[in-house]
Amino acid sequence: MTENNNRDIPKDTMIEMIKVGRNYPPDIQALSDISLTIETGEMFFLIGKSGAGKTTLLKLICNMEMPSNGLIEVAGYNINTLKGKDLALLRQRIGVAYQDFKLLGDRTVAENIAISMEVSYKKSRAIKHRVRDLLDQLQLSDKHDILTGELSRGEQQRVALARAVANSPRLILVDEPTGNLDASTTEQVMELLNRSNKAGATIVIATHDASIYQGSNNRIMELQNGKIHSVTRGNS
Ligand SMILES: Nc1ncnc2c1ncn2[C@@H]1O[C@H](COP(=O)(O)OP(=O)(O)OP(=O)(O)O)[C@@H](O)[C@H]1O
Ligand SMILES: [Mg+2]
């Protein structure tokens, strides 16, 4: 990136949102008045009832949606005014596991996971090694060459997560990472995210699954009707 256009943003801030809102026509206020700072290296949980605005907030952070008002900075860059190569470079540093997965159903598991690494010109041997390692961690080794369209939802969910973390992004956004998983697979998913977090990644997780944030000391923000209801910590 050519220059940091917001030099007053401290280096230890990964996400800064100031009075952010997002409306959908005709009159849906999916988010309003969201002011929030997420530190670099934090694991941050986003909770709230269905329709509260969790997915919308994640989409704003990765520039998949534009805010209707307010300011969003990621790693010190205004993500809504960055353009061209600078925006592409910042996006490469953000890994996203979508709630609806967005996998390429006619490509294999390995091909789906490799995509983010290929886009950033990683060597083929490194990609193969990383893909096998992630599949191993997520108990999916036997699915390497299967088309993702043929997987169960729980398997697809883990492939989406593997794709999001494969290129070791600085920021990882995960939307309902454990919604279709049993307790032991949930634990493996959280181990993988914890490892990425220990390696320095900032992680934002939207979830309905209290088991993954209770008992941790991470911050938990609850959205209610598109507004911040509370920010607390787990009870460890
Ligand atoms: N593209 C869209 N067009 C119109 N309304 C939308 C759109 N996306 C989201 N909404 C609305 O915005 C609100 C917030 O939706 P969002 O998907 O962010 O909720 P959520 O907290 O992620 O819910 P869930 O827990 O069910 O995933 C909802 O009322 C939803 O219907
Ligand atoms: Mg959602």
Image (spheres, rainbow, N blue to C red):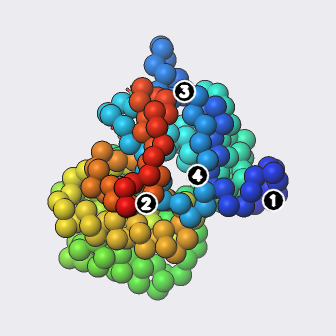
x, y percent for residue 60: 55, 40
Q: What residue type is labelled 4?
A: Ile
Residue ID at (54%, 26%):
32
The residue tagged 4 is 38
Q: Which mark is residue 32?
A: 3
Q: Answer yes or no: disc 3 within 8 Å of ligand 1.
A: no
Q: What residue type is labelled 2?
A: Asn
Q: Is residue 197 left or right of residue 188?
A: right
Q: Which amino acid does label 3 sit on?
A: Ser
x, y percent for residue 77: 72, 50
Q: Is residue 63 left or right of residue 191?
A: right
Q: Which amino acid does label 1 sit on?
A: Thr
Residue ID at (31%, 65%):
189
The CA span between labels 1 and 4 is 24 Å
Disc on the earlier residue, 2 or 1: 1
The residue tagged 1 is 2
Label 2 crowd bin: few (<14), some (14–19), many (20+), radius 10 Å: some
Q: What element carries label 2?
A: loop
Q: In which quadrant is the C terminus drawn?
A: bottom left
Q: Do tag 4 and tag 3 residues touch (Cβ < 8 Å)?
A: no
- Examine the rendered structure and indicate whether residue 149 appears above or below residue 64: below
Q: Do tag 1 and tag 4 residues touch (Cβ < 8 Å)?
A: no
In the depicted view, which residue is nearer to us: 158 or 121? 158
Q: In this view, does 30 lie to the left or right of 182?
A: right
The residue tagged 2 is 217
Q: What element carries label 3?
A: strand
Residue ID at (74%, 57%):
10
- Examine the rendered structure and indicate whether residue 199 appears above or below residue 176: below
The CA span between labels 4 and 3 is 18 Å
